[in-house]
Amino acid sequence: MAGNLTKIGYKQLKSKLMLFGYVIFGIFALISWLIQNNLKSKFQRYSKIPIPRGMTGKDVAEKMLRDSGIYDVQVISTNGHLTDHYNPETKTVNLSENVYGSSSVAAAAIAAHECGHAVQHSLAYAPLTLRSKLVPVVSFASNWMQWVLLAGIIFVHSFPQLLLAGIVLFAMTTLFSFVTLPVEINASARALAWLNTAGITNYETHDQAKDALKTAAYTYVVAALGSLATLVYYILIFMGGSRR
């Protein structure tokens, strides 16, 4: 009798935890959607506001690199929208077309942010170094975790070790999300400080650039927390499936 009550209590607890997992996942999905829309709206607005000196994203990037004593990094244009990134392997600051040739507040902020990563690279900034080392592992995990997790959930009662393997792979991507946070926040801080001291932005446009980069940073925070919540959800499935 006591055993049956314990089993019933466990099942009720498992159901509540599963429901909690669904609710948390939904909340983070909604928050992420709202922030993404807010970010898109702000960048569209700030893309119409020119910076005082009329420099394009390319000009801003090249000047920040020179001011930082970096002469072996090339600034190039890349296809897509908001596809801007710094590639440490090729030492290139890749700016999307609407940033590369634009002289707006948004373009200046994005270009300086990506150059912030180049500065981190030149200084061997520890979180960036760690993130770079995790890239091959995360790339492998991303290619396989979806299929392993799906198969693990299907066979959770008969072969729970498969789901556990998927959880380990997903945990690597979650770790990568959290390691990314200080990298992105620090790059934005470097960008904003340089934009101000170099006179690229003034008292009005500096706050707008700060607002744009701060909103962009929120996307990384939500992504990291959402990844953690999803990881916990998979762990709950594993705990429920491995104990019948």
Image (spheres, rainbow, N blue to C red):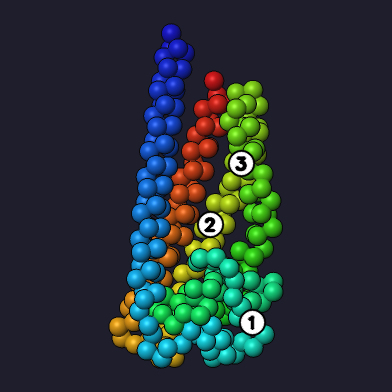
The one nearer the camera, 71 or 242, is 71
Residue 43 percent across, percent down from the top left = 39, 69
Residue 20 percent across, percent down from the top left = 39, 35
Dot 2 falls on a residue whose secondary structure is helix
Residue 154 position by quadrant: top right
- Name the N-terminal-most of marks 2 and 3: 3
- Name the N-terminal-most of marks 2 and 1: 1
Residue 216 vs 157, above or below: the answer is below
Q: Residues within 10 Å of mark 3 (few under 14, many from 20)?
A: some
- Name the N-terminal-most of marks 1 and 3: 1
Mark 1 vs 3: CB contact within 8 A: no
Residue that extends furthest to the top in the rendered view of this protein: 1
In space, the residues marked 2 and 1 are separated at their CA atoms by 27 Å
Amino acid type of the residue tagged 1 in the rendering? Gln
In space, the residues marked 1 and 3 are separated at their CA atoms by 36 Å
Judge whether residue 209 can be spotted in this image.
Answer: no
Residue 74: mark in rendering? 1
Residue 66 percent across, percent down from the top left = 57, 90
Amino acid type of the residue tagged 3 in the rendering? Gln
Residue 91: mark in rendering? none
Residue 137 vs 12, above or below: the answer is below
Dot 1 falls on a residue whose secondary structure is strand
Amino acid type of the residue tagged 2 in the rendering? Ser
The one nearer the camera, 214 or 111, is 111
The one nearer the camera, 156 or 139, is 139
Residue that extends furthest to the left in the rendered view of this protein: 204
Residue 34 position by quadrant: bottom left
Residue 146: mark in rendering? 3
Residue 158 vs 212, above or below: the answer is above
Residue 23 percent across, percent down from the top left = 38, 38
Q: Which residue is mark 2?
A: 177
